[in-house]
Amino acid sequence: MILKKIIAFIFQSPYVYQLNQFLWAGDFFPKIIELGQIQATEKTLDIACGTANAARYVRGQYTGIDLNDNYLDYARHQYPRAKFLCLDFNDLKFDEKYFDCTIVTNFIHHLSDTELGQLLYKIRYFTRDRMILSDLLPNQLNFLAKILYNLDQGNNIRTAENQEKIISRYFKIEKKYTFFSPRKIYKHIVFICIPL
Ligand SMILES: C[S@@+](CC[C@H](N)C(=O)[O-])C[C@H]1O[C@@H](n2cnc3c(N)ncnc32)[C@H](O)[C@@H]1O
């Protein structure tokens, strides 16, 4: 759809991305990071970190990777102590169990089931302790939610059951939690997972 292409182009700007987050999603990262209980002594990797909004709340050593260098430049400026790499997740190469914790937020609905399997396989290899994975859940609660979901760049918004089914091939799900974004537009699920 042409409108989606225009939106994708506009969203290359980190400022547009941040404004959109502020308007419709709000800051849900404190909730996600609190559930993940990341410690100051831990090494954390954030895959498809975008503008790295999670970095504000992650204690300890933070590394973010993303394909969009505009987002990463913004993040480098905001979080000078963090490390950022412009990389496709498919090209990630870290030693086995290199990171204590891996975060993936709002990314998996951009991936097909096969791509998601490839991502989880990689994460399981270089994650020692746990993965914190959060994504959207279907929500057609109100008119605005319907519009914004339809305009989302990701075409694979899965039910909780479908997300669980794929994750459980690679991880044991220890905890899960669902919540609405502050403006009740987006419904999120968070999984805290242990590598199998
Ligand atoms: C919806 S944003 C989520 C950003 C961030 N995790 C958050 O929750 O705010 C999806 C991000 O995935 C990144 N991305 C898309 N395909 C990617 C890939 N193959 N490897 C790494 N990052 C990718 C995009 O550049 C974008 O920043």
Image (cartoon, grey):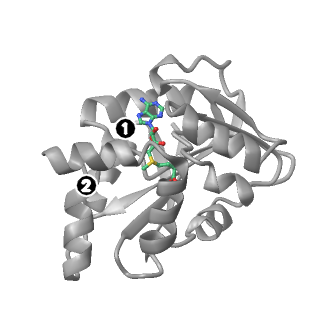
* Mark 1 element type: loop
Count of marks overlaid on the render: 2
Vertical order, 11 against 88 (above or below) = below
The answer to whether 164 appears left or right of 30 in the picture is: left
Quadrant where the N terminus is found in the figure: top left
Q: Residues within 10 Å of mark 1 (few under 14, many from 20)?
A: few
Q: Quadrant of residue 141?
A: bottom left
Residue 147: image x %, image y %? 20, 69
Front position in the image: 172 or 113: 113
Q: Residue at x 65, y 69 (%)?
A: 30
Residue 158's label in the rendered image is: 2
Which three-letter amino acid code belongs to the residue tagged 1? Arg
Q: Which quarter of the picture shows residue 69? A: top right
In this view, the mark in front (2 or 1): 2
Q: Nearer the viewer, residue 101 or 15?
A: 15
Task: Report the Cα–Cα distance between label 2 and label 1.
Answer: 16 Å
Secondary structure of residue under mark 2: loop
Instruction: Respond yes or no on whether mark 1 lies under 8 Å from ligand 1.
Output: no
What's the residue at 57%, 70% (across, down)? 27
Whether residue 170 sits left or right of residue 97 in the image: it is left
Image point (55%, 21%), residue name: 92
Residue topped by disc 1: 169
- Which residue is the extreme one toward the left? 1
Q: Which one is nearer the viewer's eye here, 37 or 28?
A: 28
Q: Visible in this render: residue 191?
A: yes
